[in-house]
């Protein structure tokens, strides 16, 4: 692996720990451009890297102390179904379409982060009773995103959880990490045996990302999210542009 891949891999874990999201949006491009994996293989590999790194963040932050079990259960059931469906859809659609969808999602997330202005105050809500049918449906939709694009969907999941009744940003991040592990594992198992995986670079990137995850947890406790979110949104704009250019250029 090149030195720039080694340098960037810890960012996967840092952003997952700080925002409960963002891992797959960096992992897929890193595997495609840094390791040379085909897009579908990169998506499948990204799912397993995100599983391990999210588990590291879960253990570090002890998130089980904050969860709302009923809401989490309905979101999880929907996510499992959606991830399974999304993985089958991802295997069926052309790489070009998949690449464009990935780039559009990355740009949408960058815009959303910039619009929020890094303010956790804009991501707060009064805790509400579980709207179970709606929670199930949202879980399915975000699970499909995970399966098709190899991302955990956390940047969509966190505001969705707050809208559905989770009290604030940090509690929503805790729920998001649990759901990302489940959804990514289901989708990753669906891809197994259907695409070729390069296990050696996967293991290296997973280890480096796990180290970054521990660093991200410390950063989250010491700094506000405003500047961090602004910097990450700029990085996502660049990543999305590269992916879109590549997808359209190979059409």
Image (tube, grey):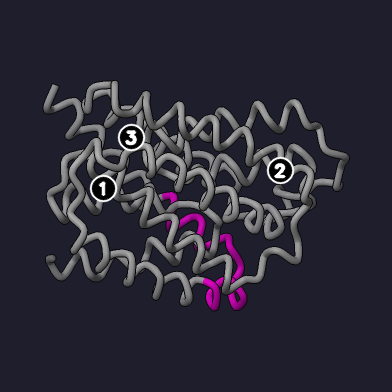
**Which label lies toward us, 3 or 2?**
2
Part of the protein shown in magenta: 217-233
Give the percent coordinates (x, y) of residue 61: 62, 71
Is 65 placed left or right of 146 in the picture? right
Nearer to me, 29 or 152: 152
**Residue beneath disc 3:** 103
**Residue 220 counted in the magenta span:** yes
Crowding around mark 2 (Cα neighbors within 10 Å: few <14, some 14 to 19, many 20+) is some
**Residue beneath disc 2:** 73
Nearer to me, 237 or 125: 125
Q: Measuring 71% from the left and 43% from the top, which residue is drawn there?
A: 73
Q: Residue 237 falls in which quadrant of the image?
A: top left
- Quadrant of the rendering where the N terminus is positioned: bottom left
Is 112 placed left or right of 74 in the picture? left
The secondary structure making up most of the magenta span is helix
Q: Which mark sits nearer the N-terminus, 2 or 1?
A: 1
Q: Which mark sits nearer the N-terminus, 3 or 2?
A: 2
Q: Are marks 2 and 1 in contact (CB under 8 Å)?
A: no
* Label 3, label 2: how far apart the Cα atoms are: 30 Å
Is 215 placed left or right of 167 in the picture? left
**Residue beneath disc 1:** 29
**Secondary structure at numbered mark 1:** helix
Q: Measuring 54% from the left and 64% from the top, which residue is drawn there?
A: 18
As drawn, 17 above or below 112: below
């Amino acid at each position: 692996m090149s030195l720039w891949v080694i340098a960037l891999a810890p960012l996967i874990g840092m952003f997952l720990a700080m925002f409960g999201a963002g891992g797959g949006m960096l992992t897929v491009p890193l595997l495609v451009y840094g390791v040379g994996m085909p897009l579908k293989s990169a998506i499948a590999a990204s799912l397993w890297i995100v599983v391990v790194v999210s588990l590291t963040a879960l253990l570090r932050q002890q998130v089980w102390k904050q969860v709302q079990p009923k809401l989490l259960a309905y979101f999880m059931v929907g996510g499992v179904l959606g991830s399974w469906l999304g993985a089958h859809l991802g295997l069926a659609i052309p790489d070009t379409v998949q690449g464009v969808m990935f780039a559009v999602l990355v740009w949408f997330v960058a815009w959303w982060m910039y619009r929020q202005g890094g303010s956790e105050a804009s991501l707060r809500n009064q805790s509400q009773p579980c709207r179970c049918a709606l929670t199930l449906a949202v879980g399915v939709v975000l699970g499909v995103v995970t399966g098709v694009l190899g991302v955990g969907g956390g940047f969509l999941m966190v505001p969705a959880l707050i809208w559905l009744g989770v009290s604030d940003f940090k509690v929503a991040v805790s729920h998001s990490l649990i759901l990302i592990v489940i959804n990514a594992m289901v989708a990753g198992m669906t891809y197994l045996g259907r695409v070729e995986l390069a296990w050696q670079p996967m293991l290296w990137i997973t280890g480096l990302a796990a180290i970054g995850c521990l660093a991200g947890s410390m950063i989250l406790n010491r700094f506000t999210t405003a500047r961090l979110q602004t910097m990450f949104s700029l990085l996502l704009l660049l990543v999305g542009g590269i992916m879109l250019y590549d997808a359209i250029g190979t059409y």
